[in-house]
Image: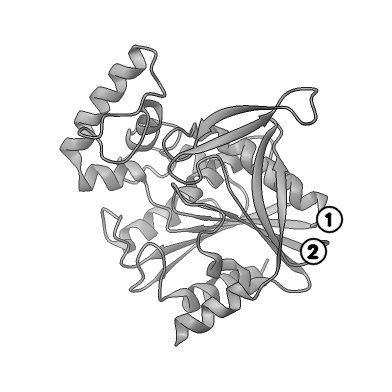
Amino acid sequence: MHESIEMNIVTATACRLVKITTPKRYVLDGLWFGPLRPRRALIFVHGLGSSAFSHPDYLIPFVNRETAVLYFNNRGHDTMARLRRRKAGAKNKYVAESGGMAHEVFTGCADDLQGAAALALAHHAREIVLVGHSTGCQKIIYSLSRPGMPRQVRGAILLCPISDYAAMLHARPRQRSRAEQIARQFIRRGQAHRLLPPEIWPEPLDAQRFLSLYTPDSEEEVFPYAQPGKPARRLGKVTQPLLIVLAGADEYRDRPSEAMAAWFAAHARDGEVRIITGAKHGFRGYEKPLRMTLRRWLARR
């Protein structure tokens, strides 16, 4: 009964299709919920291989007269995707590129988030809060740690921020090591976007994407809690207040959630950490306590 009610709330909410053009001219699709001139815009950054349709029950209930919500496809949406980039000086001419989880170049996330924030500002939002789930959290921290994000981005919410490297080192250490060897061979041959053989790695990933996700020194390893003594360089640069929400029974964690909470509390400059006891990575069945946690934090901003 509870699940049915929640789904009715989400499906009854009207939205508008929007097109985001990033500073580097990539065109991304999005869904805008709520007023066209909001005081606050919440921007959802989906995780690995997800999309603008992922987890609508997290944020859409926050839509009101002053708050809008933007869900959008970043370049890593779905397993494989065709990206469009406007040609310089041409209004309706595009260059096609491979994207999606399998081919995404992680560092492009800063351009994606700048484009999404620019759209919110074009709708006259006076403040922006970024909300990421899973690998979307890495994208938020990476982007906030670099120049280019507008000053109206007043904070961020990280839902289940998990180190992909730590998760795979814990779950598939031998397979990860072998796949890393093959990925590095492809890189040396100039085949950065060649997919790993399925007998080496079952999920479709090209060589550069595998190394980005599952090696300890990549730009994507934003939360290096599996590497004792390694500084959280990107996280330490973020000055905006953060709400970090961990799932108490997250199936991708390599250590107790309490240990992860302690690590985030020690390394975030202005971070509040909460654990939703019993919840798994998607918070399914725990949406109500999650929203209560988010609502309390947002009310203080």
Q: In this view, does 197 lie above or below 231?
A: above
Q: In which quadrant of the rendered view does residue 35 lie? A: bottom right
Residue at the extreme front? 92
Taking the spot 16% from the left edge, 36% from the top edge, the residue there is: 174
Q: Which badge, 1 or 2, is on the more N-terminal residue?
A: 2
Task: Please tell me which residue is depicted at 68% across the width and 41% down the height of the picture.
Answer: 114
Image quadrant where one finds the C terminus: bottom right
Mark 1 highlights which residue? 124
Q: Position of residue 23 (x, y in %)?
A: 71, 33
**Is residue 5 in view from this perspective?**
yes
In the rendered image, the residue lying farthest to the left is: 174
Image-quadrant location for residue 231: top left
Choose between 14 and 60: the one closer to the eye: 14
Horizontal side of 164 relative to 174 (left or right) equals right
SS category of the residue bearing label 1 = loop
Amino acid marked by disc 2: Pro
In this rendering, the answer to whether 37 lies above or below 181 is below
Lateral position of residue 160 relative to residue 243, left or right: left
Q: In which quarter of the image is the N terminus?
A: bottom left
Q: Position of residue 188 (x, y in %)?
A: 34, 13
Query: What residue is at 40 percent from the left and 38 percent from the top?
Result: 221
Residue 269, horizontal then vertical, whole percent: 54, 51
Colouring of the image: one colour
Mark 1 residue type: His
Taking the image as shown, residue 166 lies to the left or right of residue 147, namely: left
Q: Where is residue 154 in the image (x, y as percent from the top left)?
A: 69, 55
In the depicted structure, whether residue 195 falls above or below residue 258? above
Question: Dot 2 corresponds to which residue?
Answer: 38
Using the numbered discs, state the Cα–Cα distance from disc 1 to disc 2 in whole angstroms. 7 Å
> Which quarter of the picture shows residue 264?
bottom left
Q: Can residue 145 be seen in this view?
A: no
Residue at point 48%, 34% (across, down)? 104
